[in-house]
Image (cartoon, rainbow, N blue to C red):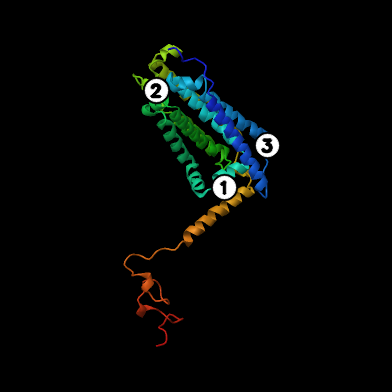
Amino acid sequence: MTGAWDWHPHLLLWGVLAALGLLVALAHRRLVRTSPHPVTWPRRRAVRFAAGLVLIGVCMGWPLGDLAARWAATALVFQRCLLVLAVAPLILAGLSDDLIRRLTRPAAVDAVLVRVLRPPVAVITVTVLLVGTMAPSLVAAQASSAAARAGLALVVLVAGIILWLPIMGRIPGIARPRPMIRAAYLVAQAIVPVFLSFVFILDPEPLYPAFAHSVEVIRLRPLNDQQVAGFVSKLSFLFVLLSVAGVQLANAPDSDDDLGPEDPLVWADVERHFERLDRRGMAIAEPVPPPPGTGDPGDTPATGQPGTPPGDVDQGHDGGPGPG
């Protein structure tokens, strides 16, 4: 079909990515100026972050983004594999430490991360997000709406960040699992979230009407396109995540006696733990309202407890009744 391979500059996309990069740089500069203990942003990390933004442009722009939008399931799956397996770790590895601390400091964000970054919960969360975004209704919506495409890509990127955080750490006060656990976690992430690929391969009918014209663009009928997409999903996750799992095992200590502090404790970890303790203390110190039926606290005597009848007030100091 004409127009599938026509070049489109996607100026809005690249403008948003440039603005995001500038915003992150300015936010880091402000934190350096206002913090009593400024943290540098190493050049290698800044380069990784910039590379992640450029790769987002490649995923969402021409030609991959255009093909993934409405022409080929293989292009859509390959785009999302890049977002999860390449863009997410680049963004995580590239952000400065001070900005990560500031973004994860709010109590709600910190509480969610503490729970989600447990390996079993992370596997379930990534599976739900990745499988959910491939629902036929959502794929049809992204084929006709740029906003839907951007929203679904953001969800996929969040899934990738959740996938990599237990491996890369970087969240203050949340320690990484041991190497053996990280390797087992990666094996689970390589298998569970992409079980949908078996559906792509074995289903006798195409699942996505949005890609009905794939044969005119990539010379694959819709069913063959869907089957190739299943192999791309499964093989890319297996190759990347199992390779990283092998590295984790290769760098693991031979015994518990050799297991040292892999991630040394820094002040940011201590500060985050103190913040959590403060929040717990505030929650415990909050006043508890009296149970229903105990009367109006305003009518109770000042010397007794709320809801205590005047005749039952103990005015003595040794457990007995006060002087009559």
Q: Secondary structure at mark 2?
A: helix
Instruction: Please tell me which residue is depicted at 46% across the width and 61% down the height of the picture.
Output: 286
Instruction: Please tell me which residue is depicted at 56% across the width and 53% down the height of the picture.
Output: 275
- Where residue 191 appears, as percent x and y from the top left, is 45, 30
Asked if residue 262 can be seen in this view, the reply is: no
Residue 7 vs residue 319: left or right? right
Q: Label 2 belongs to which residue? A: 200
Q: Secondary structure at mark 1?
A: loop
Asked if residue 297 can be seen in this view, the reply is: yes
Q: Is residue 220 above or below residue 239?
A: above
Q: Label 3 belongs to which residue? A: 42
Q: Residues within 10 Å of mark 3 (few under 14, many from 20)?
A: few
Q: Secondary structure at mark 3?
A: loop
> Of the residues under marks 2 and 3, which one precedes in the sequence?
3
| Callout 3 touching callout 1 (CB < 8 Å) | no
Q: Is residue 227 above or below residue 289?
A: above
Q: Amino acid at mark 1?
A: Gly
- Where residue 139 appears, as percent x and y from the top left, is 40, 26
Q: CA distance from mark 2 to mark 3?
A: 43 Å
> Of the residues under marks 3 and 1, which one precedes in the sequence?
3
Q: Label 1 belongs to which residue? A: 173
Q: Residues within 10 Å of mark 1 (few under 14, many from 20)?
A: many
Q: Residues within 10 Å of mark 2 (few under 14, many from 20)?
A: many
Rendered-image quadrant of the N terminus: top left
Q: CA distance from mark 1 to mark 2?
A: 40 Å
Q: CA distance from mark 3 to mark 1?
A: 22 Å
Instruction: Please tell me which residue is depicted at 50% across the width and 32% down the height of the picture.
Output: 157
Rendered-image quadrant of the C terminus: bottom left
